[in-house]
Amino acid sequence: MIDEIARSITGIIDETEAAARAARTPEELEDVRRHALGRRGALAGLFGRLAALPEADRARAGAHLNEARRRLESLLAARAAELGARASAARFEAERLDVTLPGRRGPVGRRHVLRRTLEEIERIFIGLGFEVVEGPEIEQEEFNFNRLNMPADHAARDSQDSFYVTDDLMLRTHTTVVDAHVMVGRTPPMRVLTSGRCYRRDAVDATHMPVFHQVDGFMVGERITFADLKGVLATFAREMFGPQARTRFQPGYFPFTEPSAELAVRFEGRWLELGGCGMFHPRVLEVAGIDPERYTAFAFGLGIDRPAMVRFGIPDIRLFWENDLRLLEQF
């Protein structure tokens, strides 16, 4: 019987070697291993026959079987390493990059239409000698209202229903608040433009949002008049909307300017309201530490969202905030 076991061992080794060479994937090689060395494999069956051998032959047959198992394990491990190396080489070749090829340009983003409009407005006023200044979006009530001639009981506060963070801190309702900051500690003459987001509790519709963008400018100096204001804004309108743009000033009211006016520009056959303007109220200059007897100043505030809507044919202000590429990629 021991000779029969020896012949079976030789057959299992030869069969396993041939099957291992034929295996092309780790999965196929695992099937070969299970067939030869698994719990119910060919070699395990021979181990089960050892109990039927005489005791003198049992040790010798067991040694042959153990040697056969070590040989098969070594053979299968070597074949597994070979298949792994081939797989790695194939994957490396598939993922290899040809560094001599020209690079592929990735998608390039673009500035939002509101940001582009704001930058264009800033560029125009910089050309007119204005300094661009930014300020915080969370403001003290003192600067947002009181220093702009709107004390706590002033009726104008009703039209600027605000978002309060604390009893004294609020989201700014206009960029004019930055003017009140800038004038403190500076000596005229000054030409300043401020810009950024503002917040009011407006009901959302096609032309209103609780957050909107605004630019605000002012000029302080000796003998500054309303004529200077009209000249600056008329020049801005022609630069922004084309040489054929016409401006219109209608009487208006703002607590921090006197006299005050509403500015509109005729653009593509229609009048578009841009914002308000006027001469700074003497009280505003006085609170900022500027002598209103010696200096005068004009100020203006212009919206950005609505002019951009008209200029680019955008029908609904809410589209600015939806991040829809179908809109944004047009401009």
Image (tube, rainbow, N blue to C red):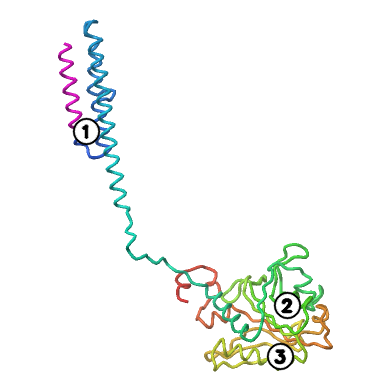
* Numbered tag placed on residue 251 in the rendering: 3
Residue drawn at the location 39% of the way across and 67% of the way down: 105
Mark 2 touching mark 3, by CB under 8 A? no
Q: Residues within 10 Å of mark 3 (few under 14, many from 20)?
A: few
Residue that label 1 marks: 20
- Mark 2 element type: helix
Find residue 137 and report its horizontal and vertical position in percent: 68, 68
Relative placement, left or right, of 188 versus 240 is right
| Residue 47 image-quadrant placement | top left
N-term mark: 3 or 1: 1
Identified by mark 1, the residue type is Ala
- What kind of residue is marked 2? Asp
> SS for tag 3?
strand
Q: Quadrant of residue 67?
A: top left
Is residue 14 shown in magenta? yes
Residues 238 and 212: in front is 238
Q: Seen from this angle, which residue lies furthest top?
A: 55
Q: Decide which of 303, 196 is in the foreground and name it.
A: 196
What count of labels does the image hold?
3
Which span of residues is magenta-colored? 1-19
